[in-house]
Image (spheres, rainbow, N blue to C red):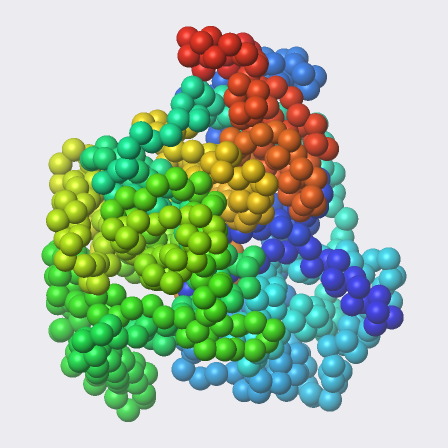
Amino acid sequence: MSVNIQNSIEKASKVIGHTWPLYSFVTSNPLSGYEKMSFTKATQHAKEDLGARVFPDGSVFSKACSSGEIDPILLENALKDNGFSQSLDYYLDQLKGENSIIKKRESSKLDIIMSKWLSSFMDEGIAEWQMPDKSEGFYSAWRKLAKYDNDLNIKKTSSIPKTSLEALEIVLAEVSKDNYESVFRFHLAALPGWTGYINHRNHYNSPWQEAFPITIQDYLAVRLWIAKNLNYNIVPTKSETSPDDSFSKLQLTFLKAWEKSFQKSLLKEIDVTEANHSEPSTPDAQLVFCIDTRSELIRRHVESQGNYETFGYAGFFGIAMDYENLEDGIQRKSCPPILNSAYKVEEKAQQNKSDVFKKHQRRTKQVKFSEYFRKRMKNMLPSAFGYVEGSGFFYGLSMIARTLIPNTIYSFKKNNVVKHEDFCETEIHTCKSDSKETQGIPIAEQVAIVKSGFDLMGWKNFAELVVFTGHGGHSANNPFNSSLDCGACAASPGRHNARMLAKMANNEQIREILLNEYNISIPKRTVFIGAEHNTTTDEIVLFDAQIPQSHQKALKNLKKDLIRVQETATQERLAVTTSSVKLANIKASSWSETRPEWGLAKNAGFVVGSRALTKNKHLGGRCFLHSYDWEKDSKGTALEGIMQGPMVVTQWINNHYYFSTVDNNKFGGGSKITHNVTGNFGVVQGNGGDLKMGLPLQSLNETDKDMYHQPLRLSVLIHAPLSRVSNIIADNANIKDLLDNEWIYLMVMNPEESNSILQYDNNLNWKYISKEVSNKKEIKETTNKRVLEEVFA
């Protein structure tokens, strides 16, 4: 029986995804457990198991139609092809009736009880008094305390089984083995935010999980034992409303027409004639940005300011590392969650700056003690009232200043705080391999990291200055601040990885090996710099403390142009013509700002190819952009790395935004206005309930009702030989599953066939989107618009 229970728990657990903590808020597909089935089937399961909305509602489709975002001809053809012969208005009216067929799950007393116990046990330091016996695990700790909870009606600890498995065996004694999975699935889906966080702690083996273990089995045992004790029916009742397949088909038809409309508009922007164009001369500087959609805007503005070349590369810059923050000593992951961290990076004082380093350490200790002292004074019973009364005047002044002059305070802090990047340098402290830790990192691995970056981006020549630019978001009073940081760095700022790669690329020994063994020639005059793009203010900060005197003039010119870049970029992003930088700074520093920036909202496309494909094209911040040169990747190794890594991660991001938008209550974070932070790791709405697993409403909507993000699945365009892409898909089952099951759309611009564009059509089959034009002269004379309209009509 125990084997049946454990197997059923494992299968039922697919109903839940991962709820990431606020301090590392990684965007991921909440239906990741269903990715091996089709998108259509997965959404049907989510609708039944979670009572969730899985498609945009009727009003969203209606607005998309009226605004022209859905091409009317494409929609009309799609409706006819799927057997819908009535008028468009008729079907839009039908879509508005979705609420009547969605099975809603009401919050029960059992959910409230479980939320209370989970928040107490899983607390990560916010509570002044911790739950006793947490180190023994959730089930054991609950068992000892259960008799003190009046809601449970448990009189004696001895009446509760000693182990979670024993408890489940007793509760399920009269339940058919065939129903185990459905019972578990129902109870896991009742609190998907909390169970998703249990799933996350187990999967990523966090320090809190090691110290205070909790498992899905523990959760189910506690929940079902409480249900049994309170005489609740543990077996879910069958829904009175059966799923309407024809209605779901109608929703999916509208969604696909919208997605196809986006693909059509994207392909009109792609410059087919310039696809193989190479830069004629060496630029004054080259800047590498993350593939993040926010980089699409900033790259355009950088290029417009002078002779600059930009690249797109996953923002962890190829270094699978953990970073130990100098400010708080906390070690955080700084690479994609799908990778195991191979290195631990920390800071050390630069030569001749050890005195500044020590001064900074003393100041940090003073700040920490001050924060500890204030917390103790507020929370200790003898001092709480007196401290609050005595300090209220000063806190009041601070609140007034932060409310009325946030920009002044932001500027003061920025200009008067010495950043540790100015007197420290990154250093790999330990290298993790085979469960062992060794000092430093082998030079061969450093060479591989640097070479891999140049290979993936298709690098051709080197400017005098090469800037690796990580990114991070900056905001005040924002529990979801990490969601604005770099997704490729597990929701950490990318500046540490950028500085680390710059340090490696400046190493003379590494350059010599690259030249002798791989024929990669980096000129002696080339200097690599780490930097950070503040995506909330569009300021780009260069970490240039160690740049030689010979490069100061070029550096000064670059900084001057970057100041202008910030002005023009914020003007476009904030849709203002004056004081745009000031407005951006206010958004970054105002504690009342619910929407400091849009993050990756509106993401819908991913372009893999040379910058010539999209340079001078306004993609509206909707596309991830990864640099790639198919001619320099004859074996397809670089492209396979891009498809295995960045393409999968961008699909996570895209689906996180999709589901958070279509059902913000179930998959998103609800309104920031009524958020309460719990346990230092999450938020609940109001005073309890389920842990919120996704993005807040303000990150997705312009108002409570008006949508900003457009919930579309990711459309990927790769400029590479079709045979190369097909071989990679055939060799990687996980990529093939995502494509066959329609979690991602894939288009290929085939340079071996006059850059004709084909779309993946299941099981390694392809169909033409744009027709082959064999005459090169005809390609130049034929606009993309004409070719595409012929095919999409």
State which quarter of the image contains the C terminus: top right
Q: Which residue is drawn at 20% across and 62% down?
A: 545
State which quarter of the image contains the N terminus: bottom right
Which quadrant of the view contains residue 186?
A: bottom right
Residue furthest to the bottom in view is 382
Which quadrant of the view contains residue 560?
A: top left
Residue 270 makes an appearance in the image: no
Q: Which residue is drawn at 55% across and 64% down?
A: 340
**Foreground residue among 363 and 76:** 363
Q: Position of residue 146 (x, y in %)?
A: 63, 82
Reply above or below: 188 against 56.
below
Residue furthest to the front in view is 516
Reply above or below: 319 against 393.
above
Q: In this view, does 333 lie to the left or right of 640?
A: left
Q: Position of residue 167 (x, y in %)?
A: 76, 76
Q: Position of residue 463 (x, y in %)?
A: 28, 44
Reply above or below: 361 against 590.
below
Reply above or below: 772 against 293.
above
**Foreground residue among 551 and 481:** 551
Q: Residue at x 76, y 52 (%)?
A: 237
Which quadrant of the view contains residue 758?
A: top right
Q: Residue at x 63, y 56 (%)?
A: 16
Residue 630 makes an appearance in the image: yes
In this figure, what is the number of numbered marks? 0
